[in-house]
Amino acid sequence: MATGSNRKTKQRDALVSVLERAERPLSVAELLEAASKRIEGLGVATVYRAVGALLDDGRIDAVEIPGEPTRYERSDKGHHHHFQCEKCDRVFDIAGCLDNLRKLVPPKFRVKQHSVMLYGVCATCSR
């Protein structure tokens, strides 16, 4: 049987399943709500432990937004950016990237990484 962070648990499996079906990054509260439908009595401490293990294993990535709780998503999504709805606070994936970022960088500067966050109102809240 595996030990340490590689140990499979039904709680971790439930969170992985939720993240595999999610079309957007989820907060711990959203993960808890969704996974609680599969595992009765799931607690927030267990979710935090499982998220930590999944981060350590490289199975999920953290999505950091200043002033917001961290959200999590599968690590196999490739390079992409995010959109946050100002009404419901949900965060959505945006496929692709800006092609002209190099034009914005001063001469002789080297960009090592970047993050783009768009803000507005999602389709559901626009109705």
Image: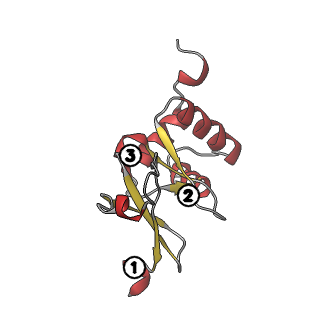
From the viewer's side, name the closer residue of 98 and 24: 98
Say which mark, if any, is on residue 20.
3
Say which mark, if any, is on residue 104.
none
Q: Is residue 19 above or below residue 107?
A: above
Instruction: Name the amino acid type tagged 1.
Output: Thr
In the rendered image, which residue does mark 1 sit on? 124
Instruction: Name the amino acid type tagged 3.
Output: Glu
Q: Which residue is drawn at the image coordinates 50% and 46% (left, top)?
A: 38
Q: Label 1 crowding class (10 Å Cα cut-off): few <14, some 14-19, many 20+?
A: few
Q: Which residue is drawn at the image coordinates 55% and 43% (left, top)?
A: 39
Cα–Cα span, label 2 and label 3: 14 Å
Q: Label 3 crowding class (10 Å Cα cut-off): few <14, some 14-19, many 20+?
A: few
In the rendered image, which residue does mark 2 sit on? 30
Instruction: Name the amino acid type tagged 2.
Output: Glu
Q: Which residue is drawn at the image coordinates 45% and 60% (left, top)?
A: 106
The answer to which image quadrant residue 23 occupies is: bottom left
From the top left corner, tell me how far across and down residue 127 is, in percent.
38, 88
